[in-house]
Amino acid sequence: MTCFVSHTSVDCRNAYELSEFWRELLAYEMDVDDPNEPGHEECAIHDPQSGHVILFLEVPDAKAVKNRIHFDLRPRDGVTRDEEVQRVLTLGATQVEDCRGIHGTGTGWVVLADPEGNEFCILRSPHEVEAGGAEQADAGQGA
């Protein structure tokens, strides 16, 4: 007998605002029969391709330390890592650390934080990995 991940939960101060940031970043959707609205203490978004769900839950505590778990994201649709970093910054993310080129030219990732300070990484796109090799030099190294 085994388990599977039902959804990923993110504790936050404002579930609606953070779900909107991540919905735009990931091109996820909300449930049209139960849409997220300002003031909701729980807001879910899902990937229309895979079904993966992220649930944002309001908690009274402020984020105090570095994440113990984080998302490593790869750009879709032929977008490069650097193009995606620029797009995500315009959505309201902040850059925490720049690890581009850490293992040589064309490698690395960028550590960003969402509006509540949760760190995540933008890795090279699948096309960049295929063209440049060294996929393991990007995976699992960030935030």
Image (tube, rainbow, N blue to C red):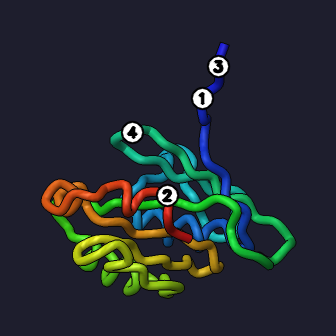
Residue of label 4: 50
Mark pair 1, 2: CA separation:
21 Å
Residue type at mark 2 is Gly
Instruction: Tell me, yes or no, whether the two marked residues, 4 and 2, touch with CB atoms within 8 Å.
Output: no
Picture residue at 59% right of the left edge, 70% below the top: 18
Instruction: Tell me, yes or no, whether the two marked residues, 2 and 3, touch with CB atoms within 8 Å.
Output: no
Q: Dot 4 lies on which element? A: loop
Residue type at mark 3 is Thr
Depth check: give the residue in front, 37 or 74.
Answer: 74
Mark pair 1, 3: CA separation:
7 Å
Picture residue at 46% right of the left edge, 60% below the top: 72
Mark pair 4, 2: CA separation:
21 Å
Q: Which mark is residue 2?
A: 3
Mark pair 4, 1: CA separation:
14 Å
Viewport quadrant of the N terminus: top right
Local crowd at mark 2 within 10 Å, few (<14), some, or many (≥20)?
few
**Quadrant hosting residue 16:** bottom right
Residue that protrudes farthest toward the front in the picture: 104
Mark pair 4, 3: CA separation:
20 Å
Q: Position of residue 128 (x, y in %)?
A: 19, 63
Depth check: give the residue in front, 14 or 107.
Answer: 107
Q: Which mark is residue 4?
A: 1
Q: Which mark is residue 140?
A: 2
Picture residue at 42% right of the left edge, 77% below the top: 110
Depth check: give the residue in front, 34 or 100.
Answer: 100
Residue type at mark 1 is Phe
